[in-house]
Amino acid sequence: MKLTADYHMHTPYSDAKSTVMENALRAKELGLEAIGITDHGFSHVMFGVRRKDVPKIVAECHEAERVTGVRVLIGMECNVRGVSGLTCFREEDYETFELFLAGIHVMASYETWSDYRLGWESWWRTLLHLKPSRSLVKDTTQAFINTIKRNPVDVITHLNYQCFADVTEVAKCCRDYGTYLEISSKKQHMTDEELDKAVQTGVRFVVNSDAHHTDRIGDVLLAEEQILRVGVPLDRIDNIDGRLPTFRFAEYKKHL
């Protein structure tokens, strides 16, 4: 299994060490065709991108692509901000960005007070190794489903990492709307059983590093080990072995 593109990585504009250019140079060394610069969304309280920095990010992505020849997509890992499916992007942001990732993060600014349980209750239950309540699983699952339905999301990131959703139902929605499910190589987010259930839905996958430093860009070892254990069909992973995904966000923007 050889990675073609790594679509999830961070820079100092959120919570990482390596610059856009350093990431692109490392990707070139590894022979990657494309990368996604996907810092944390505007609503992330601790590490979110500031809107005033967006022009600088755009300029750095363009320069890194020019220097390295690696396709550098201007993206964001938006926060799922509530059961309604609200994210960090506004409609006017679509013109600037090229890659739309979405995931649940504890330190996000949520839409309503009740929505904070998606992050905070999930976090403390994970910390204390407590099972989630049925209502938490129901709300989290619906939040992901509504996010996919309401927004042209390319990739759902680290599903069920410090959150609790019905993987089968989220995967079905991803399948139906053309959103990829991420298999993260930074941390195992789905159990083997959950990943197998996702496979059974027919959803398509991308493998990403979620790199916060250049030494992890393109590192797919953890993901590859799980993929082999579970028996994920390699032809269902669209950013390996020379393949590149067809992203939903880019298709959506053609019709704006």
Image (tube, grey):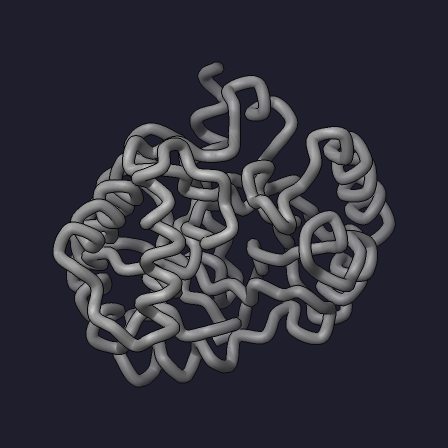
Q: Residue at x 76, y 63 (%)?
A: 17
Q: Say whether residue 224 is left or right of residue 65.
A: left
Give how far across and how far down residue 110 sits, in percent.
Answer: 43, 38
Residue toward you, 141 or 22? 141
Q: Residue furthest top?
A: 256
- Residue 59: x and y in percent read 82, 36
Q: Is residue 237 visible?
A: no
Residue 38 position, x and y percent, is: 61, 48
- Residue 189 x %, y %: 37, 69
Q: In the rendered picture of this protein, how many numbered marks are placed on residues?
A: 0
The residue positioned farthest toward the front in the image shown: 113
Image height check: is 1 above or below 17?
below
Q: Is 170 above or below relative to 230?
A: above
Residue 154 in sight: yes
Q: Residue at x 60, y 42 (%)?
A: 75
Q: Toward which corner of the image does residue 76 lie, by quadrant?
A: top right
Decide if residue 70 is on the left or right side of residue 9. Answer: right
Q: Quadrant of residue 143?
A: top left
Describe residue 96's horizontal placement relative to residue 141 as left or right: right
Q: Residue at the location (13% across, 56% down)?
A: 134
Judging depth in this view, the residue of 31 and 124 nearest the camera is 124
Residue 146 located left or right of residue 108: left
Task: Identify the residue at horizontal 45%, vertical 45% (top origin).
Answer: 102
Relative vertical location of residue 206 with respect to residue 113 in this rendering, above or below: below
Q: Residue furthest left?
A: 134
